[in-house]
Image: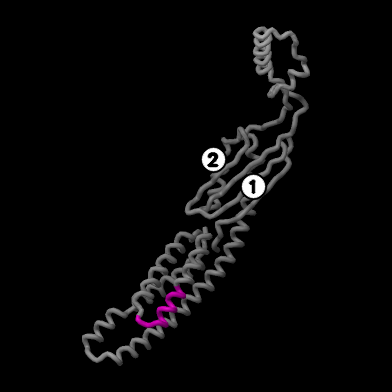
Amino acid sequence: MISSMTGFGSQEAEVDSVGRICVELRCTNHKFMETVFHLPEGMLSLEDKLKKEIETRISRGRVFCSVNIKGKEAQGIFVNRKLLKNYLQELNSLKKEFKIKDGMSLDSLIRLPGILSLKENKPAGIHIWEHLKPLLLQALAELLKTRHKEGRALAGLLRKRSELLKKDLVLIKSRFAAAVKYRLRKIKSEEERSAFLKGADIAEEMDRLSFHIKNFQQKIAKGGSVGKELDFITQEMQREANTLAAKSFDLVISGRAVQMKSQIEKIREQVQNIE
């Protein structure tokens, strides 16, 4: 089975003593494997663990992993006494410098930025992992499911397009044999016949193209992480189709070769989505 590189998966749960944990995974096309993380403050130590779990199951694509933890609020408040002390020192200095008599009330002081805040439980990364890992695995399973589903659709599309290439190649081979016989009847000298056969021969290109199409279909049937291989094969198919079109002396063959080039280009666009 082949897989697409695009997909999405998420999972969240309420955990006692921690709060609500939400894991979200998004995957897009990429030449290699890359993981990008967006983690809560104090959770950077989990990045290696998350990366290991993700890259064990995904071999290619750019994966965006977002973890959000909304901790439970504790019954209490936090007063930043050190900051309050600095405020008072600066305010007293201003009062002396500018001879200001009015003082600040407690109500005014606690309204200063950063002085008063609610306490919130923020569990350390090492303690949250046992709750986070199951959610990550469930989100990964969902992500892989969407990648496999799209991969099946891509495989079917690529098989159909490669079968069209095979049919085009059969027609070209048949047309080539007939066109050569027709042209040779009009050539009198042996020297001209030899030069014509040498310059017009596209047998090698047809054989190579036939091999690449067969190899392409075998890779799709094999499945797995074959995106890079399929991309290389389509490049080789395009190269042979270009040469075939350039060397052909027959307009029908040239036209069919151009159609094949267009079909191969469409195939290659789809191959870019495969893991």
Give the side of residue 43 with respect to residue 266, left or right.
Answer: right
The residue under label 2 is: 48
Helix, strand or loop at mark 1: strand
Residue found 58% across the figure and 52% down from its top: 27
Residue found 50% across the figure and 53% down from its top: 30
Residue found 22% across the figure and 90% down from its top: 189
Q: Of circles 2 and 1, which is in front?
A: 1
Q: Nearer the viewer, residue 148 or 199?
A: 199
Label 1 amino acid? Glu
Q: Nearer the viewer, residue 82 or 135?
A: 82
Label 2 amino acid? Asp
Instruction: Tell me, yes or no, whether the two marked residues, 2 and 1, touch with CB atoms within 8 Å.
Output: no
Where residue 171 appears, as percent x and y from the top left, is 44, 83
Give the side of residue 42 with respect to residue 164, left or right.
Answer: right
Where residue 35 appears, as percent x and y from the top left, is 54, 46
Helix, strand or loop at mark 2: helix
- Report the Cα–Cα distance between label 2 and label 1: 17 Å
- The quadrant in which residue 97 appears is top right
Question: Dot 2: few (<14), some (14–19), or many (≥20) neighbours within 10 Å?
Answer: few
Q: Residue 191: in sight, yes or no?
A: yes
The residue under label 1 is: 24
The part of the chain drawn in magenta is 249-260
Q: Is residue 172 above or below residue 224?
A: below
Q: Is residue 101 above or below residue 141?
A: above
Give the mark nearest the N terminus, 2 or 1.
1
- The quadrant in which residue 50 appears is top right
Inspect the magenta stretch and tell me whether residue 159 lies in it.
Answer: no
The N terminus is located in which quarter? bottom right
